[in-house]
Image (cartoon, rainbow, N blue to C red):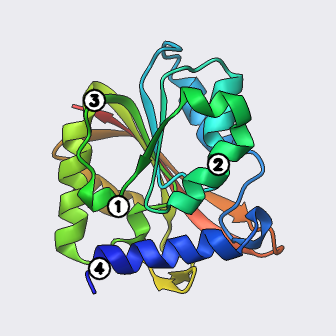
């Protein structure tokens, strides 16, 4: 079975069997991501994509703030369906993209690429480089890349899958050919189960 099909089957099952508060990464309100986006003081027509958005409420919160050019990509059609149901009629205004990130062929360039869910699941060098290449081709010059990923003190697995852990320096080395880092900081995520996960948040700008 192809790796992409294995990934799709895994995430389809997760979103078919678990409620929002039954997955460790869920946030009722994605405060840190929203603060980073709002700190950029960008136009409300800016093109923003949430990669691996799943059951996140980021798109809904951005709509409340009058951003109107929003896309959500996820490998799981179940995740997209659930997110669309949350938004009700406002879901018609979103570009819903069902795709493995490694198969993503963007039709436009984004002003902001946000990822709190996908990058740390890529564990081999070829997949990581492919992600970087897709990202680079998808972000406008001087556009922004917001990445929240597991830090070096974060969990070794998530949703039963192996992940990679990162420091700010490692990420700067990976993305530095195309992006300059503006800020990088640690953040502790309180899971719905009362446990903690250590993340590192990073704001990059396209060179």
Q: Position of residue 182 (x, y in %)?
A: 40, 37
Q: CA distance from mark 1 to mark 3?
A: 18 Å
Query: Of residues 130 and 169, which is closer to you in this image?
Result: 130
Q: CA distance from mark 3 to mark 2?
A: 23 Å
Eye-nearest disc, 3 or 2: 2
| Of the image marks 1 and 2, the number of the one nearer the N terminus | 2
Label 2: which secondary element: helix
Task: Confirm or deny contact between disc 1 and disc 2 (CB under 8 A).
Answer: no
Q: Position of residue 196 (x, y in %)?
A: 72, 72
The answer to whether residue 73 is left or right of residue 63 is left
Vertical placement of 191 versus 65: above or below? below
Vertical placement of 94 versus 101: above or below? above
Say which quadrant the C terminus sits in: top left
Quadrant of residue 181 in the image?
top left
Q: CA distance from mark 4 to mark 3?
A: 27 Å
Q: Which residue is mark 2?
A: 83
Task: Confirm or deny contact between disc 4 and disc 2 (CB under 8 A).
Answer: no
Q: CA distance from mark 4 to mark 2?
A: 25 Å
The answer to whether residue 103 is left or right of residue 202 is left
Task: Confirm or deny contact between disc 4 and disc 3 (CB under 8 A).
Answer: no
Q: CA distance from mark 4 to mark 1?
A: 10 Å
Quadrant of residue 138 in the image?
top left
Q: Which residue is mark 1?
A: 100
Q: Which residue is mark 4?
A: 3
Q: CA distance from mark 1 to mark 2?
A: 17 Å
| Of the image marks 4 and 2, the number of the one nearer the N terminus | 4
Q: Which residue is mark 3?
A: 109
Q: Dot 1, crowdedness within 10 Å: few (<14), some or many (≥20)?
A: some
The answer to whether residue 86 is left or right of residue 167 is right
Q: Position of residue 37 (x, y in %)?
A: 55, 30
| Of the image marks 1 and 3, the number of the one nearer the N terminus | 1
């Amino acid at each position: 079975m192809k790796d992409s099909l294995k990934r799709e089957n895994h995430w389809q099952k997760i979103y078919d069997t678990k409620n929002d508060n039954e997955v460790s990464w869920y946030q009722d309100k994605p405060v840190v991501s929203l603060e980073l986006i709002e700190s950029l003081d960008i136009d409300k027509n800016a093109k923003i994509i949430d990669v691996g958005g799943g059951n996140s409420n980021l798109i809904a919160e951005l709509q409340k703030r009058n951003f109107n050019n929003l896309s959500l990509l996820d490998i799981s059609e179940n995740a997209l369906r659930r997110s669309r149901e949350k938004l009700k009629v406002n879901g018609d205004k979103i570009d819903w993209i069902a795709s493995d990130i490694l198969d993503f062929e963007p039709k436009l360039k984004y002003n902001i690429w946000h990822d709190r869910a996908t990058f740390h699941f890529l564990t081999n060098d070829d997949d990581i480089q492919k992600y970087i290449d897709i990202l680079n081709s998808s972000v406008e010059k001087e556009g922004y890349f917001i990445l929240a990923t597991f830090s070096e003190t974060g969990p070794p697995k998530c949703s039963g899958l192996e992940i990679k852990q990162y420091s700010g320096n490692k990420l700067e080395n990976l993305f530095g050919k195309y992006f300059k880092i503006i800020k990088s900081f640690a953040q502790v995520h309180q899971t719905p189960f009362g446990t903690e996960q250590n993340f590192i948040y990073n704001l990059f700008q396209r060179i």
